[in-house]
Image (spheres, rainbow, N blue to C red):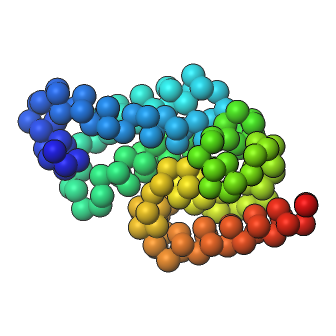
Amino acid sequence: MSDDELVEQIRLGNENAAEELIKRYYTSILRYCKWHCSDFGKAEDLTQETFLKLFKSLPGYKGKQKFKAYLYTIARNLCIDENRKIRIYPLEEEGAIGKECKEIIRIEDRAEIHELLHVLSWEQREAVILRFGEQLSFGEIGKVMGCSMRTAQSRVRNALKIMRKEWNNER
C-alpha cells in the first residue's frame, strides 16, 4: 500500500494503517531527530511528537507534495523549535553523529566528521544530513528546507567541496 493510500485509510479511521505508517517511518524519523539532538530520549520525544502532529494535520494534507517530504518537514520544524529552546547546535555532541554520514564521507574518526560539519553553514549542514543521513532526494530536500531542488543540489555540492578542502588541509 502506498503512503497516500495509508493516509486515506487513516482518514477513514483505520488504526492498522496508522500503525503501518508509523512502522514504515519511525526509525528514519528517529535517526533524523538524533542528528539534531544529542539526547536520545529527546530524539525519541521529537519523533513521537512528529507523528502526533502528522496525525493531527492529516485532515488538511492535500497530497500535493510527497508524503515523505511532508513528514520530514514536520520533524525538521520540531527539531528547529527544540534547538531554539536549548541554544546549542544539535550536532554538538559526538554521539549525535551517525554511522551513515561516516560511511558516506569515509572518515573513521567521529570527531573529524563533527569538525567538518561545523565548518558548513546551517543550510549546508542540513542539506548534507538530509541527503546522506536520510537519503532524501534533492527534490525532497528542497521541499523540507523550503527551497528549490537546484538550491538543495547547490548546497550539498558546495558543502562537499568545503568538507573535502578542509579534510585535505588537515591531512
Q: Would you say residue 121 is visible in this rendering?
A: yes
Q: Position of residue 120 (x, y in %)?
A: 73, 61
Q: Would you say residue 53 is visible in this rendering?
A: no
Asked which quadrant contains residue 85, the reply is top right
Residue situated in front as seen by the camera: 87 or 99: 99
Q: Position of residue 138 (x, y in %)?
A: 46, 67
Task: Locate residue 52 relative to residue 17 in the image: left or right.
Answer: right
Residue at the farthest left position: 12
Task: Locate residue 21 relative to residue 75 in the image: left or right.
Answer: left
Task: Locate residue 43 relative to residue 163 in the image: left or right.
Answer: left
Give the residue at x 68% y 67%: 160
Say which quadrant the C terminus sits in: bottom right
Q: Is residue 53 above or below residue 133?
A: above
Asked which quadrant contains residue 19, the reply is top left
Q: Position of residue 96 (x, y in %)?
A: 67, 37
Give the residue at x 37% y 46%: 71
* Count of residue discs: 0
Q: Is residue 154 above or below residue 96?
A: below
Q: Is residue 25 above or below residue 49?
A: below
Q: Is residue 29 above or below residue 165?
A: above
Residue situated in front as seen by the camera: 151 or 31: 31
Say which quadrant the N terminus sits in: top left
Give the residue at x 60% y 67%: 156
Q: Position of residue 79 (x, y in %)?
A: 55, 41
